[in-house]
Amino acid sequence: MGTIHFLVPDNRVVKDQPELMAAFTSGIDGHIFPTKVSTGAGFIEFSKTTADSCKLNLAWQVPGYGRPIVRTASLSEKYNDYILVVELARGKLSELKDQKASWENSGMNIPAEYFELERAAFQSFRQAACQQDDVQAATESAEASLVSSFQASEILLKSYIAQRQAFRKQKSNVAAVSLGCFLSGTDTVQDWYPLFNEHLTTLGVPLNWKLIEQNEGQCQWEQVDPLIEWCLANRMLIYSNSLLDLSLDGLPPWLHYYQHDPMHMQDLICDYVEMVTSRYVGKIRNWDVIARANSGGAPGFSEENRLTLAARVIDIARQADDENQLFLRVDQPWGAYQGRGGHRLSPFQFVDALLRSGIGLTGVNLEIAQGYQMVGAGFRELMDISRLIDQWSTLGVPLYVTLAIPSSTQPDPLASNRIKVVPEQWRFDWSPQTQSEWIDECLPLLMSKQAVVGLFWSHWSDLQPHTYPHAGLIGQDASLKPAFDRLIKRISP
């Protein structure tokens, strides 16, 4: 057990800020340790399960950038205290220079504006490091360093995106990334067929077990079948929404009666996967077989059970048709949920284990949800998303990315009651316009990544039951949000 003690000005500790309590520590290799957070007058204390050196990851207010996750450099325990913002500035500046060096070594041209901001960040940090006998003064200088580092990061990333997109356009004038959207229900979907046909290349049809078999032994195909036939008739690529969802409330409620008989429960699950994949042989080639197996939550499933089940159902889907393209949906891909202590494997390790087993997993669908409490434990800046995609690209398999971002902070009665919108995480509060502006910034980055072959929006309409509050492209007033227009314009070649 180890403890790291940080000093902060009294007015900077916000005890009711949910992201602060979700802060976590991580090792040099990225492993996340269970972490306990304590606050008091002028200090924040982080207790972890190891005495090794580690990095602190927490959401912190950066003027002009909201409350993104910021990391310290690797810190060891010591008898005297660290000044929190000084260490955050040190960590951010170190990451920034490492990323610049990496891209520069790969042939990227670094813009002159970047070097000016990097120098400003270093000068402010140097001043903060020399003022550590005065917590307030050191914090103010470190905060100035953080702002300059974030500005430099923005310049660096924009230049990277522009150069990568120019390179990809030289190879092909066709959009390298397909655009799709998941449907969470089939009511009134026919009203939107013309938009689907004109602007989307892929449709995520709702084949989730909880939706199809709401009562044991009574499968409802009458609404899904016409949708699939329409997609085939209009040459729309079909991608199944996750057949299984292993989150807390993702499986049919009646299945919980079998949680004390795990072998029988797994047999029922496998029977469903075999039934669906066999029913649509030759019609659906792309299957999102299982979602949230990495984070879990479904009663009766340990991490080992989930890993075994994922391997088993992927193998069953492969046997139904050896031409099936099988994907695993990974939520919270940064793995911050490990900080709660219930997981041994990171999301990356979980998927890597399945790929190494040789069961025939085609690729990964990374679910990136921003603006929600306890989903990834905070808001991630674009540079974090870039590093995430680069890490997952090392697996050597195609990547889909599913996006969710809220358009409002108001209650959403049809969304999961486990997930809440956190206001003011980004530079602007959440609104339909903010949702579209985030898309405008994030999509070019994702489209610049070679491993990303497709983008999905988490759900089409807020008028259907869904997971993420206010993340749909159709609002509760049944109108299109500005986000849809941004999506299609960004994807068009």
Image (cartoon, rainbow, N blue to C red):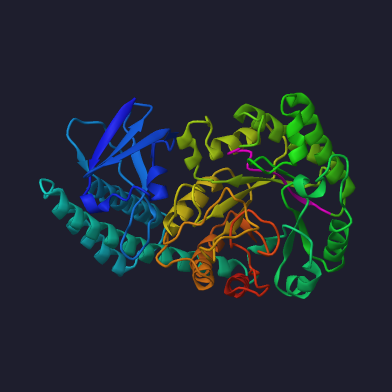
Residue 200 visible in the snapshot: yes
Q: Is residue 288 magenta?
A: yes
Say above or below: 263 vs 435. above
Which image quarter is the C terminus in? bottom right
**Residue 276 at x, y percent in the picture:** 84, 45
Instruction: Please give the name of the residue rendered at 40% of the width and 56% of the height, measured from the top-left corner.
Output: 103
**Residue 94 at x, y percent in the picture:** 30, 49
Say above or below: 168 vs 397. below
Please name whichever residue, 346 or 219, is drawn nearer the observer in this view of the structure: 219
Is 28 on the left or on the right of 493, as rendered? left
Which image quarter is the N terminus in? top left
- Magenta extent: 284-296
**Residue 193 at x, y percent in the picture:** 78, 71
Instruction: Please give the name of the residue rendered at 75% of the width and 24% of the height, measured from the top-left corner.
Output: 261
Instruction: Please give the name of the residue rendered at 31% of the width and 53% of the height, measured from the top-left corner.
Output: 97
Q: Is residue 474 magenta?
A: no
Q: Residue 224 is drawn in which quadrant?
A: bottom right
